[in-house]
Image (tube, rainbow, N blue to C red):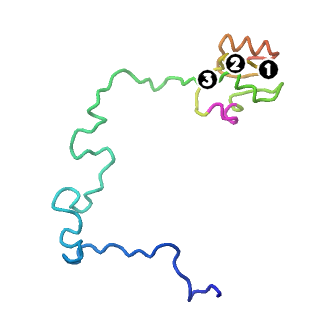
Amino acid sequence: MALNLSNLSPGGKKKKPRRLGRGESSGRGKTAGKGHKGQNARSGGGKTHPAFEGGQMPYARRVPKRGFNNIFRDTVLHVNISELNRFPADSEVSVENLKESGLVKRKGKVKILGDGELDRALTVKANAFSTRARAKIEAAGGKAEVI
């Protein structure tokens, strides 16, 4: 049977919409399923912002806030020496390379830490190095350059 405009049918269910306020015997007459009075019985009553708690003091305002949040702080992202073994020998490892490989996922300064072993010579360029990391990179025949 060929498919044409005379025999098309909608994909999925053919569910009819609820018919509200069409008499008591329909089961959704009178108050049309909204109950009696109250905010949600009014037109537009259910449209409040997510933090609204019905006039009660919102959670974000009733919880005590202490301390100081420095919005200018530098976030330092840590990468261990052992994770640098995924790069080929005698290559240059920069912050951009670390982002592409998925070792660094956010914005911030990158610090190389000395956990693990490095089995190849790499030129590593980062914002900071721990003393152990710098020693292990140079012991493997590579260079540790601070950006």
Which residue, given by chain and number where applicable, does mark 1 sit on? 119
x, y percentage for residue 86?
75, 30
Tell me the element at label 3: strand
The image quarter in which residue 127 lies: top right
Q: Which residue reaches farthest left?
A: 37
Residue highlighted by disc 2: 116
Q: Nearer the viewer, residue 131 or 10?
A: 10
What is the crowding at mark 1: few (fewer than 14 residues within 10 Å), some, or many (at least 20)?
A: some
* Three-letter code, disc 3: His
Depth check, front residue: 116 or 76: 116
Q: Which class describes the residues within 10 Å of circle 3: few (<14), some (14-19), or many (20+)? A: some
Mark 3–mark 2 Cα distance, whole angstroms, equals 13 Å
User: Residue under circle 3?
Assistant: 78
Q: Which quadrant: the C terminus?
A: top right
Depth check: 41 or 13 in front? 13
User: What is the distance, in whole Å, between disc 1 and disc 3 at their CAs?
Assistant: 19 Å
Q: x%, y% of residue 42?
A: 21, 61
Q: Does 110 appear above or below 29?
A: above
Q: Position of residue 14 (x, y in %)?
A: 44, 76
Q: Are marks 2 and 1 in contact (CB under 8 Å)?
A: no
Three-letter amino acid code at the position of disc 2: Gly
Identified at 38% across, 76% down, the residue is 16
- Looking at the rendering, which quadrant does residue 32 occupy? bottom left
Q: Which residue is depicted at the point 74% across and 27% down?
A: 93
Question: Circle 1 — which element?
Answer: loop
Quick check: 121 left or right of 30?
right
- Report the magenta residues as a range: 98-104
Q: Quadrant of residue 24?
A: bottom left
Pick whichever of labels 3 and 2 is earlier in the sequence.
3
Element on which disc 2 rests: loop
Q: Along the line of sight, which residue is nearer the eye, 66 or 41? A: 41
Residue at (70% x, 20% y) in the render: 81
